[in-house]
Amino acid sequence: MALNIPFHRVNWVNTIFLLLISLLAVIGAPIYLIVNGGTDWVTAGLFLFYLVATGLSITLGYHRLFSHLSFKAKWPVCLFTLVFGSCAFENSALNWCSDHRRHHKHVDDDDDPYNIHNGFLWAHMGWILFKVNPEPPLDNVADLRKDKLVMWQHKHDKAIAGIVGLLFPTIVGYFTGGWMGALGGLLLVGALRVFLVQQSTFFINSLCHCVGKRPYSSRCSARDSFIMSLFTYGEGYHNYHHEFQHDYRNGVKSWNYDPTKWAIWLLHKVGLVSNLRRVSQTRILLAEMAEARRHTENRLAVLEASGAKICENTLKTVKEMQEKLTTAYHELEAQASQRVEASRETITRWRSETQDLMDRLSQLRPLPA
C-alpha cells in the first residue's frame, strides 16, 4: 500500500533525533573506536549494563508489565523499568502502552499505528516519522493514569532520558578518560546503545509481521522468529504473543530463548513480582491443533482445486491423520470446557501427532505430468 504523506505531516522532532542518533551510532561510534584504539573497561561495562537495562525495561516493563498487565510488580521494579525505559528514547510508558494496546486491538487494520499492510518501512519507523492522522487520544490507558510512578515518568520522560541515558555516561566517561572518555560515553553508551535497542524494538513491529512461522494462529500477520528473539530478549515469538497477549511468557516451549520470561520468573522467586499470568498447556495445544487443521484444509483445497494429481497413498494418510486430529481436538476441547487439564503425556502425544500431520502435508506435491 503506497502512502501519500504531505510534507507538513513530517514529525521533524522525531525525524531529526532518529537521524542524528543513527548517524552517531553507525558512523561516529566506529570512527571513535578506530581512532581511540577501542575503549576502556568502564565504558564497555556501562555499555553492556545500559544495553541490557534499557532493553529489558522495554520488554519486561513497557511491554509485558504495563501494556499487557502480565504480572504485578513492586515499586523498585516499576521505578527501574520506567527510568531505563525512558533511556531507550521510545517515549513515555503511557504513550508507548497506548500505541501498543491499539496495535493489538486493531492489528493489520487502519487503526493499527504500525500496520504492516502500509509497508515494511512504515511498520518499522515510518509511523514514528510521520503524522498521518491526528494524534489519537490516550483513551485506553485509564488504569495506568492511576499509577503515580507512571504519571511521574510521563511528565519527566525527556528529562530522565537526557540526564540518565546520555549525560550520566558522558560524565562518567570524562572522569575516567578525560574528553575522549566523555566522547566514548556519549557515542557508545548513549548513541550506539539507543540505536541498537530502538532498532530491535522496531524489527518486532516490521520483520515479525512478515517473516517467520504462524504455529498458533494465521488470523493476523504476527509471526514467530527465533532469530529476532535473540536480539529482543525473547520478544521474537510474536505469533504466540498475539494469540495469548496476557501471558508473561513469549517463548513457552522449553527450548525457546526468552530471557525476559526468565527475568520475570527470577523476580517472582525473590518476591519483587507476583500474579504471573500464564496460558494453560491445553489452550496452547488447542491453538496449535486448530491452526494445523486450518493449514491442512487450505492446502488440500488448493491442491484439489488445481486438479493436480497427488500420490494416493500419501493423500489417504494425510486425510486419515486429519480426521484423527479433528477427533483429538474435540476431545481436548471437551476436557478444557469441563476445566479438566489434560495429562502431560496426552498433550505430548497430540502435539507429536499434530507435527506428524504437518510433516505429511509438506510432502504433498503434484505428480509430474
Image (cartoon, rainbow, N blue to C red):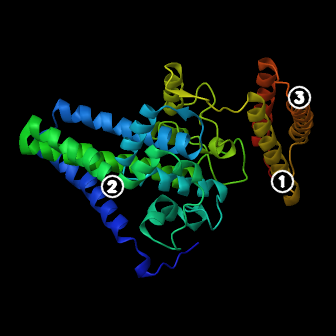
Mark 3 element type: helix
Q: How many marks?
A: 3
Q: Is residue 188 left or right of residue 176?
A: right
- Looking at the image, which residue is at 25% across and 35% down? 46
Rendering coords of residue 180 (x, y %): 9, 44
Residue 5, position in %: x, y?
48, 78
Q: Indicate which disc, 2 or 1, sits on the residue closer to the N terminus.
A: 2
Residue at mark 1 to residue at mark 3: CA–CA distance: 34 Å
Q: Residue lying farthest left?
A: 178
At x 63% / y 68%, what residue is drawn? 110
Q: Looking at the rendering, in which quadrant would you find the N terminus?
A: bottom right
Could you say which quadrant of the image residue 85 lies in? top left
Q: Amino acid at mark 2?
A: Lys
Q: Which residue is mark 3?
A: 335
Residue 264 on image: x %, y %: 52, 29
**Numbered badge on residue 303:** 1
Splitting the image into 4 quarters, where does residue 102 fall? bottom right
**SS for tag 1?**
helix
Mark nearest the camera among 2 and 1 is 2
Disc 2 versus disc 3: distance between alpha carbons? 51 Å
